[in-house]
Amino acid sequence: MTTIDLNTDHPFARALKQAGLRLTPQRLAICRLLAASHDHPSAQMIHDELSVEFPSLSLTTVYNTLETLVDLGLVNELGSVGPDGIRYDADTQPHVNLACTRCLQVIDLPSHHVRLLEEEITSSSGYAVKGARVLYYGLCPKCQKELRA
Ligand SMILES: [Zn+2]
């Protein structure tokens, strides 16, 4: 298990505080885990990982914290991939997410086109874009190989 740094100076922690949430160790741990994770975790995955250290952490707290971070534009909601439900991404720079419907892995794929698309959307609509969900799904190379074997 990763050690969780409870530094309240984390940008996510500051944003939660500004949004009026009390900075509990649980909420700080959720912020840290999200920022450090490349797995695009679901609320359940975050809960499972943190409940070892915080046995009193409720799934509702995880959901509420995620919802606030999404509202603030700090985390993107990617949509659901498997039985675990919606997956979250703390990287809000324009990129593509690819989900495998078999092993449920979600990866990042940098894309010049998505970057240009976001610029185009912003300039032609006048919207202040707060987030995006660019999720492609299919079978990852490893799962394709396993199915052929
Ligand atoms: Zn796979």
Image: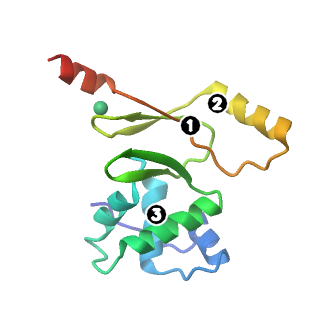
Residue denoted by label 1: 134
The residue shown at (32%, 40%) is 104
Q: Dots 1 and 2: beta carbons under 8 Å?
A: yes
The residue shown at (39%, 55%) is 42
Q: What x and y, as percent, mark residue 101?
A: 33, 35
Q: What x and y, as percent, mark residue 12?
A: 58, 65
Q: What x and y, as percent, mark residue 93?
A: 62, 43
| Residue 3 to residue 81: above or below | below
The residue nearer to you, when weighing 28 against 61, is 61
The residue shown at (29%, 63%) is 48
- The kind of secondary structure element at disc 1 is loop
Q: Amino acid at mark 1?
A: Val
Q: Is residue 41 among what the camera can see?
A: no
Image quadrant where one finds the C terminus? top left
Q: Residues within 10 Å of mark 1 (few under 14, many from 20)?
A: some
Q: Is residue 82 among what the camera can see?
A: yes
| Residue 102 to residue 64: above or below | above
Instruction: Give the CA distance from mark 1 to mark 2.
Output: 8 Å
Label 3 or label 2, whichever lies nearer to me, is 2
| Residue 58 to residue 134: above or below | below
The residue shown at (57%, 42%) is 133
Ligand 1: does it lie within 8 Å of the C-beta at label 3? no
Q: Amino acid at mark 2?
A: Val
